[in-house]
């Protein structure tokens, strides 16, 4: 259920947004790359460094105890945020990329054999392709892709049953596509894989901070996401994994913090999640992320999702109506909070540079989805990605500037 929210007052929580760029008020529409941070998160980072900075899990002294309590409280908060069964299912990583690398290196090395298949979708980010290519090369497994239908950017679900063969050991899928805005039916995809005993991984980089996420309802085995895309700091990410899988997986990196007992020729590891967290972790990161999650839930993720979707749908329709010849990617309806488009004869980088001069931050390029760009027959797209602090006026200004750019470059 969505409620009335005072979006204008929420926007004032973000100090960075009230500045000018090239003499124009900043319009930040690169939220899929990274989100901005509310003052409460910035304050929490400062507070940690000013008042209780210490290493975790090691010291007996007061500051270390406080840092450890805050670090583990953040883990418990993440578990609640995605409805994991236990904080022990939450591993702190540097981000989505490291979370997926952990699964590929640890679970992949232990479970993949020659002839096994890793099924991915054609709309995956490089971070959910390259780690699998690497482990496939080492284990003799192969990669197979569930096709994307075309510019409307939907998964071809009719092909799924034939692709889910007995050889498939893992099905990895992006929840929300960062270059199309497609929202994949991950609960259905996971259910269809689970019915065949296939392990599932969901890349939640673009979903976790934007919509309510419940890993038990999705029914996935692994779920990966990044703090920096949801108002948290950079350098902190999450791997959720079902407890039974973590118990059976070998460590990812090894060294201090993750051990129970070390002898010169033998080591006993701690239980998950600590078994997967070697060395001094990012401590300020989880503490900042904790505050970010509280902040997002105070607004309400259903409200955020409705706001993001409304802006993206409006942007899609305005661009379609006002920019002659524009090619829009991803579904027309039901899209996440971003629009991705190409204008014939104008390179995405030129559009982004033009928009930057008008104070608008966009992204142009392959968005770390090069294979998808090749499939769609484009080198690059221009992407505007929204968050709850963006406004309809900003979308109007975006469309105006895109029209100006088209006229300028097509003179
Ligand atoms: N997957 C998707 C869908 C993404 O959008 C991103 C970030 N662009 C990533 C994975 C990687 O996230 P990070 O760089 O935070 O590890």
Image: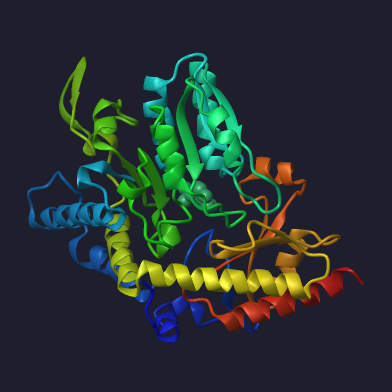
Q: Is residue 200 above or below residue 135?
A: below
x%, y% of residue 233? 39, 60
Q: Quadrant of the N terminus?
A: bottom left
Q: Is residue 129 above or below residue 323?
A: above
Colour scheme shown: rainbow
Name the foreground residue: 159 vs 330: 159
How many numbered callouts? Answer: 0
Q: Residue furthest right?
A: 411
x%, y% of residue 96? 44, 46
Q: Is residue 237 above or below residue 105?
A: below
Residue 265 visible? The answer is yes
Q: Quadrant of the C terminus?
A: bottom right
- Side of 409 relative to 69 (left or right): right
x%, y% of residue 221? 35, 38
Name the foreground residue: 123 vs 105: 123
Identified at 47% across, 33% down, the residue is: 171
x%, y% of residue 205? 46, 52
Q: Is residue 157 above or below residue 362?
A: above
Identified at 62% across, 51% down, the residue is: 367
Name the foreground residue: 3 vs 14: 3
What is the quadrant of residue 348 in the picture? bottom right
What is the quadrant of residue 143 in the picture? top right
Identified at 75% across, 66% down, the residue is: 351
Residue 278 visible? The answer is no
- Side of 99 relative to 400 (left or right): left
């Amino acid at each position: 259920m969505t409620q009335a929210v005072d979006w204008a007052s929420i926007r004032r929580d973000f100090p960075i947004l009230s500045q000018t760029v090239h003499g124009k008020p900043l319009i930040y529409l690169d939220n899929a790359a990274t989100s901005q941070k509310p003052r409460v998160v910035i304050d929490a980072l400062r507070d940690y460094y000013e008042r209780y900075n210490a290493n975790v899990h090691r010291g007996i002294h007061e500051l270390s105890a406080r840092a450890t309590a805050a670090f583990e409280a953040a883990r418990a908060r993440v578990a609640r945020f995605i409805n994991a069964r236990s904080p022990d299912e939450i591993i702190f990583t540097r981000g989505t990329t490291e979370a997926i690398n952990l699964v590929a290196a640890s679970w992949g090395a232990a479970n993949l054999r020659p002839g096994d298949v890793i099924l991915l979708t054609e709309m995956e980010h490089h971070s959910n392709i390259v780690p699998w290519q690497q482990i496939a090369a080492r284990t003799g497994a192969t990669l197979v892709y569930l096709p994307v239908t075309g510019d409307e950017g939907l998964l071809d679900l009719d092909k799924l049953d034939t692709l889910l063969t007995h050889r498939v050991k893992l099905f990895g899928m992006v929840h929300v596509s960062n270059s199309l805005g497609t929202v994949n039916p991950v609960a259905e995809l996971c259910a269809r894989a689970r019915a065949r005993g296939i392990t599932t991984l969901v890349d939640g980089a673009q979903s976790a901070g934007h919509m309510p996420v419940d890993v038990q309802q999705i029914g996935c085995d692994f779920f990966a996401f990044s703090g920096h895309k949801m108002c948290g700091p950079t350098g902190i990410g999450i791997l959720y994994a079902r407890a039974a899988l973590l118990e059976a997986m070998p460590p990812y990196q090894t060294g201090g913090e993750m051990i129970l007992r070390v002898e010169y020729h033998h080591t006993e590891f701690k239980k998950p999640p600590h078994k997967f967290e070697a060395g001094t972790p990012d401590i300020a990161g989880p503490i900042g992320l904790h505050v970010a999650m509280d902040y997002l839930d105070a607004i309400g993720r259903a409200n955020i999702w409705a706001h993001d979707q409304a802006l993206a749908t409006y942007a899609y329709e305005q661009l379609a109506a006002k920019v002659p010849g524009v090619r829009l990617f991803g579904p027309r309806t039901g899209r996440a909070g971003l629009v991705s488009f190409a204008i014939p004869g104008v390179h995405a980088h030129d559009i982004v540079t033009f928009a930057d001069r008008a104070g608008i931050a966009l992204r142009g390029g392959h968005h770390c989805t090069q294979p998808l760009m090749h499939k769609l027959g484009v080198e690059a797209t221009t992407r505007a990605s929204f968050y709850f602090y963006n406004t309809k006026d900003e979308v109007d200004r975006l469309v105006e500037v895109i029209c100006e750019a088209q006229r300028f470059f097509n003179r």
